[in-house]
């Protein structure tokens, strides 16, 4: 599927406490799986002084492969995407605590990720944070502009709802959530919060090898 060169990304995250109940609700709502469970390895690039992070910007290389291919022909099935995200900004007429995270986003598919890494390094950027997750993407009947992304991460399981604000609100209600449940955190900030709670020094947000071999 072609990736749009530039767009505005509007999204929220929702914590999942009971995955089996969530899957049952998706089934009752006749959610359609549009992308099967996929493993993602994400690498953020930044300057040594974290200049991009401090400005709220992001440069990321994401490598994706079907979860079923991890132990087999993984490299042959890989898709690689370069992403730029601008600083988050609140929607018009928003409250002091905006419900949605809105970013300028531009993406392009890569055929030579190693060469792109060399280009970024040549510009003074270095890998600053790696994180991975398994993602399954769904669509709901009657809400065509919305993506429902079920993310299994090392720090918990979340839904990401991406689309117009009215579609996000409608889907969240159907899935049993209220506006108070909306999160606008990045996975990096969720990981840092989990490390603080556990008294653990942050590093990269990666699964143990046994998780990826299943």
Image: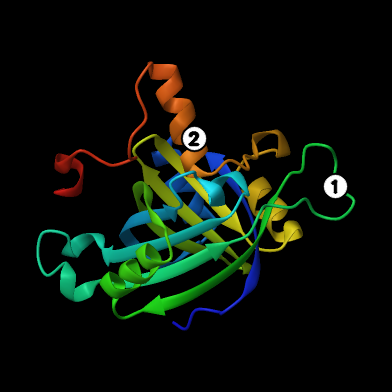
* Residue in front for this viewpoint, 130 or 23: 130
Neighbor class of circle 2 (other Cα within 10 Å; few <14, some 14-19, many 20+) is some
Looking at the figure, which quarter contains the N terminus?
bottom left
**Residue located beneath label 1 in the image:** 94
Question: Residue 180 appears at what percent x and percent y?
Answer: 70, 33
Secondary-structure class at tag 1:
loop
**C-alpha span from label 2 to label 1:** 23 Å
* Residue in front for this viewpoint, 174 or 190: 190
Question: Residue 24 appears at what percent x and percent y?
Answer: 44, 47
Question: Residue 4 appears at what percent x and percent y?
Answer: 56, 79
Displayed quadrant of residue 63: bottom left
Question: Residue 105 appears at what percent x and percent y?
Answer: 60, 66
Displayed quadrant of residue 85: bottom right
- Say which residue appears at 47% left-offset and 41% top-offset: 188
Residue contact between numbered discs 2 and 1, judged by CB atoms under 8 Å: no
Residue farthest along the bottom direction in this orientation: 2
* Residue in front for this viewpoint, 103 or 14: 103
Residue farthest along the right direction in this orientation: 93
- Say which residue appears at 85% left-offset and 47% top-offset: 94
Query: Which labelled disc corresponds to residue 190?
Result: 2
Residue 147 vs 96, above or below: the answer is below
Q: Is residue 159 visible?
A: yes
Q: Is residue 142 visible?
A: no
Say whether residue 62 is left or right of residue 11: left
- Say which residue appears at 43% left-offset and 46% top-offset: 48
- Say which residue appears at 51% left-offset and 72% top-offset: 107
Neighbor class of circle 1 (other Cα within 10 Å; few <14, some 14-19, many 20+) is few
Label whose residue precedes the other's in the sequence (2 or 1): 1
Say whether residue 194 is left or right of residue 212: right
Secondary-structure class at tag 2:
helix
Say whether residue 93 is left or right of residue 65: right
Residue 177 vs 67, above or below: the answer is above
């Amino acid at each position: 599927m072609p990736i749009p060169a530039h767009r505005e990304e509007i999204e929220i995250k929702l914590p999942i406490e009971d995955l089996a109940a969530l899957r049952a609700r998706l089934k009752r709502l006749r959610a359609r799986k549009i992308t099967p469970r996929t493993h993602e390895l994400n690498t953020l690039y930044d300057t040594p002084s974290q200049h991009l992070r401090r400005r709220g910007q992001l440069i990321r290389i994401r490598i994706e492969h079907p979860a079923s291919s991890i132990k087999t022909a993984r490299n042959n099935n890989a898709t690689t995407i370069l992403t730029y995200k601008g600083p988050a900004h609140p929607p018009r007429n928003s409250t002091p605590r905006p419900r949605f995270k809105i970013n300028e986003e531009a993406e392009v598919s890569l055929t030579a990720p190693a060469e792109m890494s060399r280009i970024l390094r040549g510009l003074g950027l270095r890998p600053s944070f790696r994180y991975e997750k398994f993602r399954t993407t769904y669509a709901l009947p009657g809400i065509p502009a919305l993506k429902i992304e079920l993310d299994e991460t090392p720090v918990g399981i979340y839904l990401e709802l991406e689309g117009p604000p009215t579609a996000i609100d409608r889907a969240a209600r159907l899935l049993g959530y209220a506006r108070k449940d909306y999160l606008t955190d990045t996975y990096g900030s969720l990981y840092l919060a989990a490390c603080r709670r556990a008294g653990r020094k942050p590093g990269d947000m990666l699964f143990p090898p046994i998780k990826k071999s299943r």
